[in-house]
Image (cartoon, rainbow, N blue to C red):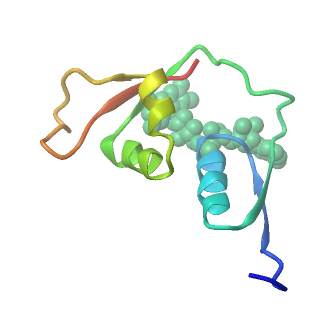
Amino acid sequence: MPGITPLRIAVVGAGLGGLTAAVALRQAGFDVEVYEQAPELTEVGGGINMGPNAVRVLYLLGLGKGLDREAVPGIRSNLENSSTRFHCALMR
Ligand SMILES: Cc1cc2nc3c(=O)[nH]c(=O)nc-3n(C[C@H](O)[C@H](O)[C@H](O)COP(=O)(O)OP(=O)(O)OC[C@H]3O[C@@H](n4cnc5c(N)ncnc54)[C@H](O)[C@@H]3O)c2cc1C
């Protein structure tokens, strides 16, 4: 809106929580800067399992394509039903 400066928000930490919050806040129109103590984000050699609720949030944020490219969908899960999907996302 003309004449209104968007609220500036600092997110401290570029982990899963910080980056997800930053993407959501940017999409909501805020001016967001992420501050991370680590000099670079690197592979940690681990994987992370994501439940349907977390996967749904990433899809809502428009990250579905990247998730589909990088993640391994769960073949079987007792969390799965006709309306949810379970992903095992590998952090690379
Ligand atoms: C071995 C292991 C396996 C796991 N497996 C799973 C799993 O399968 N599924 C699952 O859902 N969860 C899993 N978790 C938990 C999951 O990794 C955490 O819940 C999640 O990463 C937390 O996200 P976060 O953004 O809160 O914190 P983090 O991902 O820890 O990110 C915090 C970031 O803040 C930065 N930071 C800290 N202090 C400062 C500062 N003062 N200034 C600037 N930057 C700062 C850190 O460097 C870091 O990058 C696992 C955790 C571990 C350790």
* Residue 64 position (above or below residue 1): above
Q: Nearer the viewer, residue 59 or 20?
A: 59
Q: Residue at x 84, y 39 (%)?
A: 37
Residue 50 % position (x, y): 39, 35
* Residue 5 position (above or below residue 76): below
Q: Quadrant of the C terminus?
A: top right
Q: Residue at x 67, y 59 (%)?
A: 26
Residue 89 % position (x, y): 44, 26
Q: Residue at x 81, y 41 (%)?
A: 36
Q: Quadrant of residue 33?
A: bottom right
Q: Quadrant of residue 78?
A: top left
Q: Quadrant of the N terminus?
A: bottom right
Residue 30 % position (x, y): 72, 67
Q: Residue at x 66, y 49 (%)?
A: 18
Q: Which residue reaches farthest front?
A: 2
Q: Quadrant of residue 15?
A: top right
Q: Nearer the viewer, residue 55 or 62?
A: 62
